[in-house]
Image (cartoon, rainbow, N blue to C red):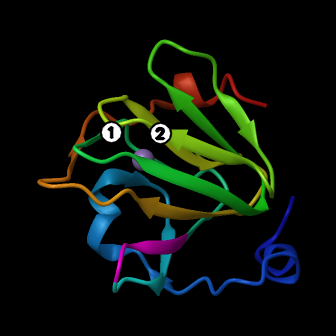
Amino acid sequence: MFTKEDLMAQCPFPIGEENSGFAQYFIGKSYLAPLTTDQMGVFNVTFEPGCRNNWHIHHGGGQILICVGGRGYYQEWGCEARELHPGDVVSIMPGVKHWHGAARDSWFSHIAMSVPAENASSEWCEPVTDEEYSKLA
Ligand code: MN
């Protein structure tokens, strides 16, 4: 198990507060730390082991993830999941259905940047089922 203490030793960014505003779109607990929001939203998002967000789509502008701690996954609809480690970068184009989150045995943090765009929005879809998630190592 890669613990919260392991994560805090590896990752220089704050974990922040429990992400209660988006809890309805996550399985498990996540945490949100705003790093800067004046020009564009840049957040450190931390997932407890097993935590992942629902399938979702960013409309208008895409999203860029920079992995900064622990081990997690990113998956696009119809594709194999990609395992993520610190230093990995994921560029998510607008309109692509996907999810991201922690491995079952590891806390995980990524920085999330929302690409600024007119009328940007996110569409939240179905949860990643235990059946799908349990296929991941
Ligand atoms: Mn996303």
Write down the region rendered in magenta.
Answer: 39-44
Q: Residue at x 49, y 66 (%)?
A: 29
Residue labelled with disc 2: 92
The reply, left or right, for residue 110 in relation to residue 19 is right
Q: SS of the residue at dot 1?
A: strand
Q: Which residue is mark 1?
A: 56
Report if the beta carbon of the residue with label 2 is closer than 8 angstroms to ligand 1: yes
Query: Left or right: where does residue 29 sit relative to residue 49?
Result: left
Magenta-colored stretch includes residue 41? yes
Quarter of the rendering containing residue 96: top left
Between discs 2 and 1, the one toward the N terminus: 1
Residue pictured at 61% horizontal, 43% vertical: 90
**Label annotation for residue 74:** none
What kind of element bears circle 2?
A: strand
Real-space Cα distance between discs 2 and 1? 11 Å
**Above or below — where is 93 with respect to 107?**
above
Identify the residue at the far top of this view.
78
